[in-house]
Amino acid sequence: MLSQFASETGITRDGGQPDNWNTTTLARDAVVTHYLKLAEDRGTVGFWSCDTVTGACCPSSGLLRLLGLEPTAHFRIAEFGDFAHPEDRSQAENIWLMIRSGIPVERRFRIVRADRTVRWIDFRSEVVLDDNQQPSRAVGIVIDMTAQHESRETIEDTLGRYRALVNSLATMEWRATADGVPIYSQGWTALTGQLEIHVARGAWMDVIHPEDRERVAAAWGQAVRTLSPYMVNLRLLRANGDYEWFHSRAVPIIKKGGRSHEWLGIIMLHDDLTNHGLPTQNDWHDLTPMQIRAARAMLQWTLGDLSALSGISVSSIRRIEAEGERSTRPASINAIRKAFEDHGLSFGDGNRVCFQNADSRI
């Protein structure tokens, strides 16, 4: 059947008469048949050719298999609409009319196979003109796109859930390049009145309260250098001219090689953290490796001392100090933090560590 399809379509490498590439029609058909078989062996593609005047069709074996038909089954493109899913009939009912009119067709819709299973397909056709520039034959391909369609739907569903969650928590979402250059969403302009082009030029710090800029820059720079989570409370100049407290946080999206691909973050109204019973900045479980090492040095603790007071094994603490929170359960970080805080330490933005009786306002 493939050889018949190849012969009837008259396919050659350059679309014209065969030259020194193939010296006979038989050799040409054999090569084309081989190419088509390679494509159809995947089981997700089929070919067809038909006379636009009589409607007589030559389907490939791959097409019949894709439709769930027997190898000897009768097939006509004019009846292809009969396979269309009831909800997609409008996509298939005029296919034959367009082909006979010399119009190429490209559609995606569902079909119901002979075994009653549903598949998504791409239907594509081209019309071959005769010497009088009238449609004489049509050739086409049908591709099973079910796997790709389901994958795309899964991604869209996941993205939709993510968007819904972020929108319920955050004032806006923001991103940054791997080297720390912010790429704010459109929500930034609505929030601050600052245009995105100014953000790209590094002017995002201009809308941060002057008293907070050094602290924010230090925390962000430390996070980018160490690939550790970024969290900071800061005052932003809103579009209405007033400063308001916000909480900003971000995490690096890590490649397999261990380097950051980009940063993904959110900005929340600071009041939302406390009014809804969410943790304030002093309550977050995240500690950087540098904070843990600095805290041990300030208290002159060995790894064994911290292990005994926190209940976390020495090997785990050693790993945490090397790799940070990305490799650790929050419960372990909280236990370590509590041990330090019980002995008078306080933790702030970036890598800040101080004794609680010192000035620890953050």
Image (cartoon, rainbow, N blue to C red):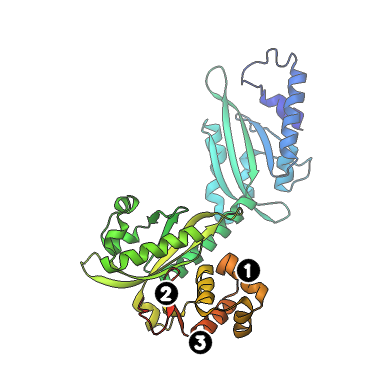
The answer to whether residue 174 is left or right of residue 99 is left
Q: Is residue 245 visible?
A: yes
Residue wearing tag 3: 342
Instruction: For mark 1, give the secondary structure.
Output: helix
Q: Is residue 129 left or right of residue 43?
A: left
Q: Secondary structure at mark 2?
A: loop
Which badge, 3 or 2, comes first in the chain's sequence?
3
Q: Which residue does the image show at 61% across and 68% down from the upper left?
A: 327
Q: Earlier in the sequence, mark 1 or mark 2?
A: 1
Mark identifier at residue 348: 2
Question: In the depicted view, which residue is nearer to us: 105 or 220?
Answer: 220
**Identity of the residue drawn at 70% across and 12% down:** 20
Q: Position of residue 143 (x, y in %)?
A: 64, 43
Q: Earlier in the sequence, mark 1 or mark 3?
A: 1
In terms of depth relative to the viewer, which is nearer, 51 or 226? 226
Lateral position of residue 109 relative to residue 35, left or right:
left
Could you say which disc has been placed on residue 319 in the image?
1
Residue 99 in which image quadrant: top right
Residue 102: percent from the left, percent from the top?
A: 52, 30
User: Quadrant location of the N terminus?
Assistant: top right
